[in-house]
Every structure is written in structure tokens, then in C-alpha cells.
Image (spheres, rainbow, N blue to C red):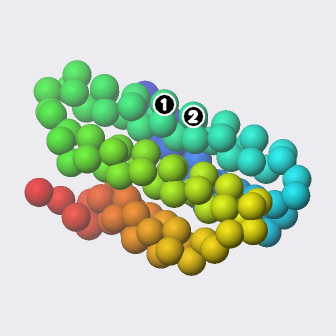
Amino acid sequence: MYNIFYQSHAGSWAILVLLLFVSFFAYKQNISLMIQRLFYLIMIISGAGMIVLQFTMGSFPLLYIFKGIIAIALIGVMEMIVGRRKRSESTKTHWIAFAALLLIVLLIGYDVISF
């Protein structure tokens, strides 16, 4: 069961990054943004499922709860990037925040950062 959550979670992250670029460069259409939001839900549900499964196996995944909080902030930054692009406002600082948060999430997710 854990493997199902893990594969859908990792796959949804990869698709989300691709959809962000599609939504950014093709900002006049809305379908990629709606699909992007669907993958937000898949990613959040699969991540929560993995945390619940780890909790039922007897471990308390505090680092992964921290990763989830950072991931939700990353979702907010991704939404701000697309929204500011639609309004033709500057997105430079949001791209920097996106890169930093994505790097932290990936490093925690692949156990490069662990406590």
C-alpha cells in the first residue's frame, strides 16, 4: 500500500512541475491550471496517506510533516507564479522561492536531508 502512495506522490510531483511551466507559458488558457490543481489534490492525499501509514507502523515522521508544510507553501508559490503571470506582474522573486522550496522538498523526500 505504501508503494502505491509513494509512486503516485512522486509521479504527481513530476507532473506538477511540468504543468507549472505549461501554465506559465500558455497563461491565456485554463485547462492546464485545472489539471495542475487536480494534481495538487493527488499529491496532498498521497502524501498524507504515506504519513498515516508510517504512523500506524509505529514511527512518528516529524521530518515528513515538516516536508508537508513546506510542500503546501510550495503549492502557494506555484499558484502565485501563475496568477502573477496572468496579471502581467513580475514573477522573479517567486521563481527563486519556487526553486528553493522545491530543492528542500526534494532533498527531504529522497532522504538527503534527514535527522
Q: Is residue 30 visible?
A: yes
**Which dot marks residue 109?**
none
In the image: residue 109, left or right of residue 13 = left
Identity, as a three-letter code, of the amino acid under mark 2: Leu
Between the C-alphas of marks 1 and 2, the distance is 6 Å
Which of the image's four quarters has the C terminus?
A: bottom left
Residue 53: x and y, percent? 31, 27
Residue at 44% across, 69% down: 97
Q: Which residue is mark 2?
A: 41
Residue at 22% across, 27% down: 55
In the image: residue 50, left or right of residue 19 = left
Identity, as a three-letter code, of the amino acid under mark 1: Ile
Front in this rendered view, residue 82 or 52:
82
Q: Which residue is mark 1?
A: 45
Residue at 25% across, 32% down: 54
In the image: residue 71, left or right of residue 38 = left
Query: Which residue extends farthest right?
Result: 29
Label 1 crowd (10 A; few <14 / some 14-19 / many >=20):
some
Question: Quick check: marks 1 and 2 in contact, CB under 8 Å?
Answer: yes
Residue 64: x and y, percent? 27, 45
Front in this rendered view, residue 103 or 2:
103
Q: Which secondary structure, mark 1?
A: helix
Q: Which secondary structure, mark 2?
A: helix
Residue 12: x and y, percent? 58, 47
